Amino acid sequence: MAIEQLTAHALMEKLQAGEISSVEATEACLRRIEQVEPQVAAFVTVTAEYALAAAREVDEHRARGESLAPTAGIPIAIKDVLCTRGIRTTCSSRILENFIPPYDATAVERCRQAALPMLGKTNMDEFAMGSSTENSAFMVTRNPRALDRVPGGSSGGSAAAVAANEAFWSLGSDTGGSIRQPAALCGIVGLKPTYGRVSRYGLIAYASSLDQVGPLTKDVRDAALLLGIIAGRDPRDDTSASLPVPDYVAELDRGLDGLRAGVPVQLLGEGIDPAVRDVVRRAIDQLASLGLAVEEVQMPNIDYSLPVYYIIAPAEAASNLARYDGVRYGHRTREPVSDIYDLFAKTRAEGFGPEVRLRIMLGTYALSAGYYDAYYLKALKVRTLIKADFDRAFEKYDVLLSPTSPTVAFKIGERAGDPLQMKLADICTIPVNLAGIPAISVPCGEVDGLPVGLQIMGRPFEEDIILRVAYAFEQSV
Ligand code: GLN
């Protein structure tokens, strides 16, 4: 097997045994990047020298017998929504095209502390708004499993980089499905942690009450390993939880004994492609045969998730993106301007793509004095009802199961002109963000040669349990 095809944990063993050096592993990724980037286009920025320097340092430490983080030397790719000190961070937007952050996001800093050489920054939908990575201002990323299809989004670059063996693993962000949906469409594992499990410090904000950073990996063990690196309290993010971080890897093979699963009928009915539904049903049967007690469950308020999300997320985005004004940092128009408002308007018209502008307008409208109660406040109330559906279900069930995406990867361009179709890509993932709970997508089969993902949702801060169920499933196929 070529080095770049190894999982991160398999590489970890070889690094520790001295069979492979970190420089060799990093060079293998960089060669692969050179080979496939002309087709896949997963990276906005490749940081080859930077990665090699970090790898060399790991190898030198190891040669001197100094103590190292167990994962030291495994190269990683980072979604371009996470700030990286001294390295351009664009959010795939013109408005941040030349932004060089003066600090690292906490998740990035923890990867650095774990001595993971950073290969580069991956492409995404502009400001993480989208489900196909077609909203990037810079390029269209292709699905390595079928180059005429989208990799999903918004973390499409991070998913494609791992699926194409350009990186051993990657970080993404998930506001309504942006880790899990691209993972499903590219045939890899993606985990959205509980809101508060991973620090959002240095994660460029889209919708602050929904955003979480999480891993995209080749298998479940790698997801457990990477989550363990990035999770935990951070004094710089007051929404990060002061809970201990379990040893996720050690918990993996505890099996399914005593665990109960609910299958929300609302997530397996209308709107789910029948072929995808069949594959997911078979996966659920498989889990049942392994000892998981499975039952259907009614969660009626889930049906309102999409409209609720498309009030709350744009409202928060409109507020968060007000900081891009052409004054403090980022792009500023070079056109002559009549006053400060004209400067804002011209800068934003040049800097933001159409989807971002649409969301800012929607959000501003929903927050305006006359409509706040009718839209925003109403959406918050329904969000509470959705959360209550989950609370009730989790009194009885340890996990909930559904498809991750209602369809397999669609063709590039196919939905670009149909915003509703595009947004329907997230019907199964968005309820999870509204409720703030953790969920993982694990590959569970194929339709016409294209991967299908099974979504496993859990109680707040029970990532260990969803990982366990995902692991049991993965080991059984
Ligand atoms: N597709 C959804 C949106 O456009 C979710 C994106 C995300 O999770 N960042 O808002």
Image (cartoon, grey):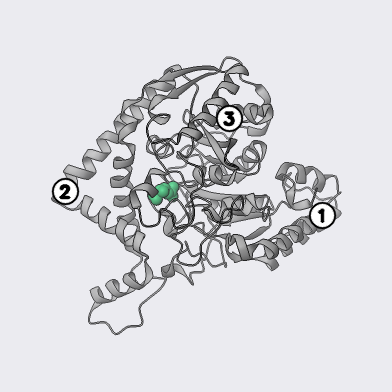
Q: What x and y, as percent, mark residue 235?
A: 49, 47
- Where is residue 53 shown, x and y percent of the image? 73, 64
Name the image quarter holding the C terminus: top right
Which numbered disc, 1 or 3, marks the residue that appears first in the sequence? Answer: 1
Mark 1 or mark 2: which comes first in sequence?
A: 1
Question: Around disc 2, counting alpha carbons within 10 Å, would you say few (fewer than 14), some (14 to 19), or many (20 or more)?
Answer: few
Residue at 32% of width from left, 71% of height from top? Answer: 349
Q: Which residue is mark 1?
A: 21
Q: CA distance from mark 1 to mark 3?
A: 31 Å
Q: Position of residue 444 (x, y in %)?
A: 59, 34
Disc 1 versus disc 2: distance between alpha carbons?
Answer: 59 Å
Q: Is mark 3 within 8 Å of ligand 1?
A: no
Asked whether 224 or 27 is in front, the reply is 27
Judging by the rendered image, the residue that carries numbered circle 3 is 464
Q: Earlier in the sequence, mark 2 or mark 3?
A: 2
The residue at the point 68 percent across, 66 percent down is 48
In the displayed structure, 417 sits above or below 261; it is below
Which amino acid type is shown beneath numbered disc 2? Answer: Tyr
Residue 371 image label = 2
**Which residue is located at x 65 percent, y 58 percent?**
118
Disc 2 to disc 3, C-alpha distance: 41 Å
Amino acid type assigned to the residue bearing label 3 in the image = Asp
Check the image and name the residue furthest to the bottom: 336
